[in-house]
Amino acid sequence: MNALHRIGAGTLLAMLLAFGLAGCGEKEEVQQSLEPVAFHDTDECHVCGMIISDFPGPKGQAVEKGSVKKFCSTAEMLGWWLQPENRLLDARLYVHDMGRSVWDKPDDSHLIDATSAYYVIGTSLKGAMGASLATFAEEQAAMRLAEEHGGRVLRFEQIDQALLQEAASMQHGGMHEHMPSDAHNAHQGH
């Protein structure tokens, strides 16, 4: 009987140790960081496949458990995010704070939460394909850029696919300076 007791106790101890180790693995996964990461010279845009560093202006990224999707512009990231299947993902969105960066080479140490950023749309500034949306952590910095380069300031919730498409066609058509001031009034309520 003593031998059975030792075998049972050994088995119980082994099972407890296995469950304890399994629990440790779960804790590591839960604590995985969803913080922004640096852009590298070889990174390709998740949407268009272009080399991200080939373009000026702010970039975007979607960080989720186990993967990071990088985009050559904030407009590319927003266009991707606005697709219904992507809205279901548990991802955090980040953009460059252009109040603390230069347009030609945004500083990766100043990536901010895209959902709280101020967006300037309709500027004369050049970026990647599509609309160039300058992003800022502070509203005053966004307002200054809009005054200097044209455009208007929006919040994350105000941006939809129709707005992105209209801005891209106006920018690439060379008409961004002639954007009607009320062209997007319908989007103000989003």
Image (cartoon, rainbow, N blue to C red):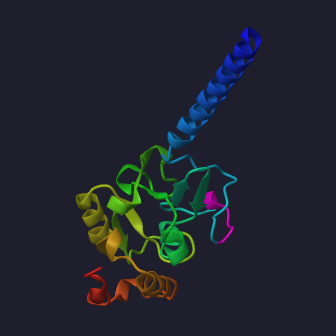
Q: Is residue 75 left or right of residue 113?
A: right
Total residue callouts: 0
Q: Foreground residue, 154 or 189?
A: 189
- Give the image location of residue 75, x and y in percent: 49, 72
In the rendered view of the protein, which quadrant contains the N terminus?
top right
Residue at the left extreme of this rendering: 140
Is residue 41 positioned above or below 170 on the image? above
Res 42 visible: yes
Res 150 visible: no
89 in magenta: no
Is residue 92 positioned above or below 23 on the image? below
Q: Which residues are magenta?
A: 48-53
Is residue 10 positioned above or below 80 on the image? above
Q: Name the residue located 33 percent from the left edge and 72 percent from the top edge.
A: 157
Q: Is residue 141 left or right of residue 114?
A: left
Q: Foreground residue, 159 or 24?
A: 24
- Give the image location of residue 51, x and y in percent: 67, 62
Q: Name the residue located 25 percent from the left edge and 61 percent from the top edge.
A: 139
- Give the image location of residue 169, x and y in percent: 49, 87
In the rendered view of the protein, which quadrant contains the C terminus?
bottom left
- Give the image location of residue 68, x and y in percent: 59, 54
Q: Main secondary structure of the magenta part?
A: loop
Is residue 106 positioned above or below 25 on the image? below
Residue at the front extreme of this rendering: 1
